[in-house]
Image (cartoon, rainbow, N blue to C red):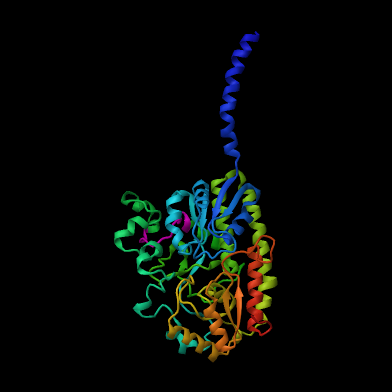
Amino acid sequence: MHRFRSGILFPLVVLFLLLTPALYAQEAPLSIVASTSIAGDIIARVAGDDAEVASLIPRGLDPHSYQPTPAALRQLADADLVFINGANYEEGLLAVIGAAVDDEALFVISECVPIIPGGHMHDHHDHGHDDHADEHDHEDEDDDHADEHDHEGEDDDHADEHDHEGEDDDHADEHDHEGEDDDHADEHDHEGEDHHHDLGIHEDAGERCARHEMELGDRFQKLQDDEVSPGPLHAVDCEAIGGCDPHVWLQVRGIAHWVLSARDILSAHDSAHAEGYHARADSFLDEIEVLEQDELLPLIATLPVEQRLLVSHHFSLGYFAGAYGFAELGTVVPGLSGLAEPGVAELAAIIDLVRERNLSAIFGEATSDDDDLMRQVSNETGAALVDLDLETLGEEGSPIGTWIGLMRSNTEAIVGALSGEMSG
């Protein structure tokens, strides 16, 4: 009898040892990489302890100029899910991300956010800026600056590599959604649109986004001009509208869309923890609603409408302006990424605008390396130069170590500077 039991137990032990790694693998938390620290913070709030979230671009670095390390590339390749902002925000990283990440594991966190056309003036209050429309609308400038204003300011040699929105036909299949060949073109050209889509747009995005809009309703502040957005990012041909503004996190409703997208995508890939993802998403939505209703809107209401005028480093405040009643008059650096340089006439026009409008402040960026231009405008106009933290979180535990802290800090800085209560 003893020999009989041993003969049965031995293969059972071997089988258990063989299965143990698989059992542990099934129980391992999802590994998630977000392209930016801001997206990583939001996704981590939804993920809790049920998933591990890392940021590709470290805190404090300019996302527009970041180059990934070999370790970052390995992290991308090993992740279960990867989230990018979309609207070509990651610019030069798109080819790297597309090569490292499988199509089904890549998602655009901004896919459901109503998008703003990039580079346009977002003046929703008609403060009489028509006189400056042609002068400062960087979409209408001449051909000499066409590449500068095509969302990122890359030169001709890199236009096809980084634009991802306006590639020519020779590269259409290479860049359409992941670089798939013709056999997969129909599979990845979602909703029958042309080759304008960002990486990471999936076929169920439209249905998911429709549900999210219904779920949010009027809970969070929308863009005040109903006609300013052509629709959610997943359904918009960015090339056809002259580029898409990617800075969607500078309005609370944009972040609410991120929360719901993260909740649904994580739940779909880890159904065992779906209840936790939903509970944390609900809790975070409550938290950001309090931020907007009890802090941001009352603070903004103290600033007269005629003083809500923004001149910034580059076009990054459009969603903030559109949601909260500001006018984005113009920028010192043309385009959406801050990588371009203004011509002499452009810089002179901005200086004239700041003087004419008697602006008390202009807004730079803490991560920018070219504050000399901003200081020149400030020195020649007397407007205070106030640096904002717009595109990356600060160190963990700092006042801008979370998106909530970042949004609170920037709103306080903008209102305080335009009211004349602080200087740069």
Residue 418 visible within the image? yes
Q: Position of residue 127 (x, y in %)?
A: 53, 87
The image quadrant where one finds the N terminus is top right
The image quadrant where one finds the C terminus is bottom right
Residue found 39% across the figure and 80% down from its top:
141
Residue found 65% across the figure and 66% down from its top:
400
Residue 203 visible within the image? no
Image-quadrant location for residue 378? bottom right
Q: Is residue 260 above or below residue 400?
A: above
Task: Look at the image and give the residue range highlighted in magenta.
Answer: 192-206
* Extreme-left residue of the structure: 170
Q: Is residue 268 above or below residue 282?
A: above
Image-quadrant location for residue 406? bottom right
| 209 to the left or right of 406 | left
Residue found 35% across the figure and 55% down from its top:
174
Count of numbered tags: 0
Residue found 60% across the figure and 15% down from its top:
8
Residue 202 within the segment the image draws in magenta: yes
Q: Position of residue 110 (x, y in %)?
A: 51, 62
Q: Is residue 332 above or below residue 171?
A: below
Q: Position of residue 116 (x, y in %)?
A: 48, 71
Q: Main secondary structure of the magenta part?
A: loop
Residue 234 within the segment the image draws in magenta: no
Q: Nearer the viewer, residue 213 or 60?
A: 60
